[in-house]
Amino acid sequence: MPQSKYAIEAKGLRKSYGKNEVLKGISLKVERGTMLALLGPNGAGKTTTVRILSTLLGFDKGSVTVENYDVVKDADSVRGVIGLTGQSAAVDELLTGRENLEMMGRLYHLTKASAKERAQELLEDFDLVDAANRPAKTYSGGMRRRLDLAVSLIATPPVIFLDEPTTGLDPRSRIAMWTIIENLKKNGTTILLTTQYLEEADQLADRIVVIDGGKVIAEGTAKDLKSKVGKDRLELTFEGAKDYKKALEVVDGKTLDQSSEDLAITMTINDINKDVSKVLADLASAKIRVSSMAVHKPTLDDVFLSLTGKVKKKEEQ
Ligand SMILES: Nc1ncnc2c1ncn2[C@@H]1O[C@H](COP(=O)(O)OP(=O)(O)OP(=O)(O)O)[C@@H](O)[C@H]1O
Ligand SMILES: [Mg+2]
């Protein structure tokens, strides 16, 4: 059979729990050696999708292949080519980090010697050497996530599913995890990652599929999505009501939002280098005192608000 250029292909996936249809026809494709981020709010259907793609959960309609194997007819072959780290991963709390890795290696039919060797490699890669001989239950959240990921990589699978690998991590551990994930990508692993963070998808993924309420509501590169969401925003606050009122005259109807209570004005900017200094210069020449300013990039909230049509003010022109 000719190899498709897609390592993962899902078509029209539907899944109900009782009367509650939680996936309403999800289709997605991931090109071999690339990373797709599945982005969505709580309850969107991310974990459900990942569990289906990784053979852990059945579905009602549609089809899925992973490395050309059908997840229903050929589930064992699919399991042989994937690694999975989930929101509830397969780490044994009572075993040490090293024992968890060696045990998983044995489950994947590595010899005792190669399981040991592979465990040591992964402990080093994931900065867990110092904690290797402590039970997993004593690990911090960040160490625990790194162990989850290490365990899923014991057999160097060509396709890996990462379900919210960085949720709940502190910024430093999140960045460490990103480096690990980027290295996987460099090695040619196909990755499907779920996340609630636009920034994470932006940093790591080649393509993004946004789901909400069990449906795909947008897809494309991070750049595509951001341009859909809207532009950067400049937020200015003023020292007094007088400054605020004068500023409204100076910017002359170009505000996106204004609050006389907070003495704040928000406006969209097209070019951060030109527009911000222009606005500040105009305000300064009118002798208006600004007490604070901030530039906001589109956030995940903006993406959802805008994509689901619930946005109050139109940001994109
Ligand atoms: N076993 C189950 N029985 C009934 N409903 C379920 C079950 N598992 C998930 N659901 C429902 O399916 C919907 C999608 O859940 P899912 O866990 O896929 O969302 P998610 O996008 O992963 O959310 P989160 O960001 O919170 O992890 C939710 O409404 C959830 O309540
Ligand atoms: Mg989930």
Image (cartoon, grey):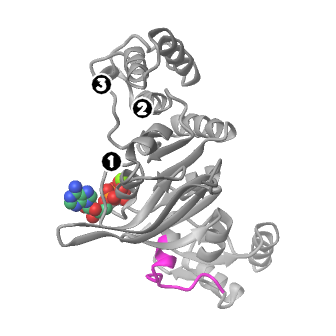
Q: Residues within 10 Å of mark 2 (few under 14, many from 20)?
A: many
Residue 85 in the image, given as x and y percentages of width and height: 42, 39
Q: In front here: 167 or 8? A: 8
In terms of sequence position, does the residue under pointer 3 or pointer 2 come before the other?
A: 3
In terms of sequence position, does the residue under pointer 1 or pointer 2 come before the other?
A: 1
Mark number displayed over residue 92: 3
- Identified at 57% across, 17% down, the residue is 121
Magenta-span inclusion, residue 49: no
Q: Is residue 203 left or right of residue 68?
A: right
Q: Which residues are magenta?
A: 304-317
| Tag 1 secondary structure | loop
| Residue 315 in view | yes
Residue 249 figure quarter: bottom right
- Dominant secondary structure of the magenta stretch? loop
| Residue 233 in view | no
Q: Amino acid at mark 2?
A: Asp
Q: Which residue is mark 1?
A: 56
Residue 82 in the image, given as x and y percentages of width and height: 48, 41
Q: Which residue is mark 2?
A: 148
